[in-house]
């Protein structure tokens, strides 16, 4: 079974800095990691490969330094990695990003399953995975916590707010996974040695044969008008005691402020 995993390299920090001119994150000088939810997607792909055989290919769209994130997945056990990088992709929103990744997947050829993390921790939109499915015109299931493959069908369990839902869908399909699905494995020593020597396949805008009107900033129907860091609020108050006592204190505070 041929599985494609889409990952993103994200800043490994809570100290987010914003470029006031471009309204984008400043990534220079900031350590980066594989998006944590995407690590769960990689682990899910590796487990399916161990059970059903096949190949795991990991792709990402980003600047040249995103190759380091791809090498992390090789150390985990991925077979092949692809970096889609071109200045034409700069400024992509989720629409343009999902289009670029879907075009890349088309050029890679055959696939049985596409896995993504449920969302990226720097954007939190959860839109790219479903967007890829729409561009490829294949089924999608989001917030997946379990998956079983039976022939050309995937049986998955979804984590919703109050219940879990079991869904079956035909393959190929896109699944976005939650962290409860598994515990990502640590790279092995052998895997790290392999990652050092591994070749990262590079693809640019011309190679994926994307329509320029759907690429980068010009192909993004949404734009950031303003972005800023909220002002810090005053110190709050932590109520202590037994649960019933805390409730009484909270009600008292709310009544003092005439909230209730």
Image: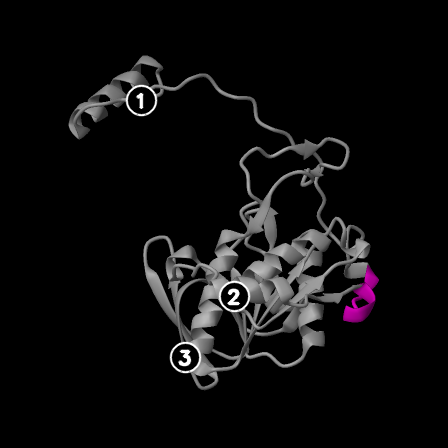
Write down the quadrant of residue 111 in the picture.
bottom right
Q: Which structural element holds mark 3?
A: helix
Quadrant containing the C terminus is top left
Tell me what residue is drawn at x 56 percent, y 59 percent: 72
Left or right of 128? Residue 221 is: right
Q: Nearer the viewer, mark 3 or mark 1?
A: 3
Q: Which mark is residue 191?
A: 2
Disc 1 crowd, CA 10 A, few/some/many (<14, 14-19, 20+): few
Q: Earlier in the sequence, mark 1 or mark 2?
A: 2
Q: Residues within 10 Å of mark 3 (few under 14, many from 20)?
A: few
Q: Which residue lies most toward the top here?
A: 256
Mark count: 3
Frontmost residue, 120 versus 192: 192
- Asked if residue 238 shows in the view, the reply is yes
**In terms of sequence position, does the residue under pointer 3 or pointer 2 come before the other?**
3
**Residue at image x 37%, y 57%?**
180
- Let me know if residue 2 is in the magenta part: no
User: Which residue has dot 3 on it?
Assistant: 51
Sequence-first disc among 3 and 1 = 3
Taking 221 as reference, is 184 above or below it? Answer: below
Q: Secondary structure at mark 1?
A: loop
Q: Is residue 99 left or right of residue 251?
A: right
Please tell me in which quadrant of the rendered image residue 223 appears: top right
Which residue bears the numbered disc 1?
238
Q: Which residues are drawn in magenta?
A: 205-212
Residue at 20 percent of width and 22 percent of height: 248
Dominant secondary structure (helix, strand or loop) of the stretch shown in magenta:
helix
Which residue is drawn at the image coordinates 46% and 16% (left, top)?
234
Would you identify the image quadrant in which residue 25 lies? top right
């Amino acid at each position: 079974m041929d599985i494609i995993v889409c990952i993103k390299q994200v800043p490994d920090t809570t100290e987010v800095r914003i470029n006031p001119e471009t309204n984008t994150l400043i990534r220079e000088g900031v350590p980066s990691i594989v998006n944590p939810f995407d690590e769960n997607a990689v682990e899910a792909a590796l487990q399916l490969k161990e059970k059903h055989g096949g190949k795991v290919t990991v792709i990402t769209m980003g600047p040249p330094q995103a190759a380091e994130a791809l090498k992390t997945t090789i150390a985990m056990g991925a077979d092949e990695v692809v970096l889609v990088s071109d200045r034409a992709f700069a400024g992509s929103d989720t629409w343009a990003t999902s289009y670029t990744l879907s075009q890349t997947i088309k050029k890679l050829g055959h696939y049985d399953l596409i896995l993504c993390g449920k969302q990226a921790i720097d954007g939190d939109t959860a839109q790219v995975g479903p967007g890829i499915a729409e561009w490829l015109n294949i089924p999608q299931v989001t917030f997946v916590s379990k998956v079983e493959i039976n022939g050309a069908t995937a049986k998955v369990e979804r984590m919703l707010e109050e219940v879990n839902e079991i869904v079956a869908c035909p393959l190929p399909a896109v699944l976005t996974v939650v962290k409860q699905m598994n515990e990502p494995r640590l790279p092995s020593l052998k895997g790290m040695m392999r990652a050092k020597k591994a070749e990262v396949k590079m693809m640019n805008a011309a190679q994926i044969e994307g329509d320029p009107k759907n690429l980068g900033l010009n192909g993004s129907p949404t734009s950031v008008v303003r972005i800023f860091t909220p002002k810090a609020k005053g110190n709050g108050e932590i109520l202590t005691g037994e649960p019933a006592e805390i409730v009484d204190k909270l009600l008292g505070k709310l009544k003092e402020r005439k909230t209730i």
